[in-house]
Amino acid sequence: MTLHLPTPDGGLKAYEPRAEPLAFDTGAPLASRVVFSAAHVVADPFADTTPDSPAAVDWDATLAFRRHLWSHGLGVAEAMDTAQRGMGLDWAGAAELIRRSAAEAKAVGGRIACGVGTDQLTAPAHDLAEVRAAYEEQLALVEGTGAQAILMASRALAAVARGPEDYLDVYGHLLRQAAEPVVLHWLGPMFDPALDGYWGSADLDAATETFLEVIAAHPDKVDGIKVSLLDAQREIDLRRRLPNGVRCYTGDDFNYPELIAGDDRGFSHALLGIFDPLGPLAAQAVRVLDTGDVLGFRELLDPTVELSRHLFQTPTRFYKTGVVFLAWLSGHQEHFTMVGGLQSARSLPHFARAYELADTLGLFPSPELAESRMKQLLALYGVTK
């Protein structure tokens, strides 16, 4: 059946959905790269909430989605910004998410790493000691579940730090305490404007030096770094300077195929929000890479970049809306509702293009279901043609 999809200029265009999905393998472990999908949460659509209320989560659907990712051999990066951490999901909700997901990972043998931040500080921090204490509380909870810790960038630290030395102080303190090696997360201001000037400088070259100084002081406590700056060459330059044994996990949702494929001087592993909707396809691509077939890997993954760049377009922080939209079309949840009401953060033409790109890639397990749900959304907006 032909759909009539809205275009940015206010018109409609005819689109013929594909009839068959792609088939993806499940189960086989990934060998050549460590790959995490930063997973979204499923809201409870029947909860009587407002955008300012604590998040109401559909735990059954949320955990089922994680089992879906694990079944394809992917790790789950839990309670990251993809899960609307700091954009609808508060610390109480994130803590419950971490506990439940870590228990589920243990039950099914899935790999999991969880975000450690300072978002329980709902008022501005007074000093570094308050920031350190908030980090310590979350680190203790994550390590207590048996999950790996991801030290996330902190809005509170960005607000109170006076310069690079304060970042060295806080991160050095946390790394000395960590029971197991952690992942350090550098999230750029395009994802969260409150993180502008992180590591003590708005000059990225200067910030990189501070970041590397933190790692060099504690290489045994750093499993890897997750870089989300949407700058492929900067990531390549940074990973070439890492101590031996410290991984680089790309968080670049614009340039991930080339960064994961790598070059003769190294490669990036992956911790990506786009691998939420791309999970099965991404896992299959990495299995091809496991055989040494770089060209086959790129042939599978390169065509997905247009969809990723569309979902992550400015303002980038609202990429989560597109991720959940595609999960609904794919049948991973029965509704298009988000915590904090963020289903309203993108336009109908944006959704239409996301649907078209994902359908063209064969991402939907049931193209018929995706088409039916797209028609429901179009009708809701008044498109009945």
Image (cartoon, grey):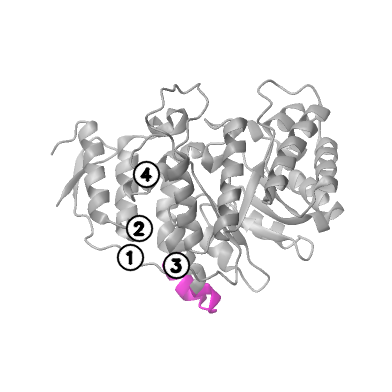
Q: Earlier in the sequence, mark 1 or mark 2?
A: 1
Name the residue carrying label 4.
333
Mark seen at residue 384 = none
* Residue 87: in magenta span: no
Sequence-first disc among 2 and 3: 3
Residue type, numbered disc 1: Leu
Q: Is residue 92 left or right of residue 279?
A: right
Give the image location of residue 284, x and y in percent: 45, 68
Q: Which residue is mark 2?
A: 363
Secondary structure of residue under mark 1: loop
Q: Find residue 30 and report its horizontal and vertical position in percent.
A: 55, 69
Q: Are marks 2 and 3 in contact (CB under 8 Å)?
A: no
Q: Which residue is identified by label 1?
A: 22
Sequence-wise, the earlier of marks 2 and 4 is: 4
Disc 1 to disc 2, C-alpha distance: 7 Å
Q: Quadrant of residue 165?
A: top right
Q: Amino acid at mark 3?
A: Thr
Q: Are marks 1 and 2 in contact (CB under 8 Å)?
A: yes
**Badge 3, how many Cα within 10 Å: few under 14, some, many 20+?**
some
Which region of the structure is painted magenta? Answer: 288-301
User: Which of the marked residues, 4 or 3, is nearer the chain's N terminus?
Assistant: 3
The answer for how far apart the CA atoms under marks 4 and 3 are is 20 Å
Report how far apart the C-alphas of labels 2 and 3 lie in the structure.
Answer: 15 Å
Would you call the spot at circle 2 few (<14 residues within 10 Å), some (14-19), or many (20 or more)?
A: many
Kindly report the distance in space between the C-alpha atoms of the residues bearing marks 2 and 4.
15 Å
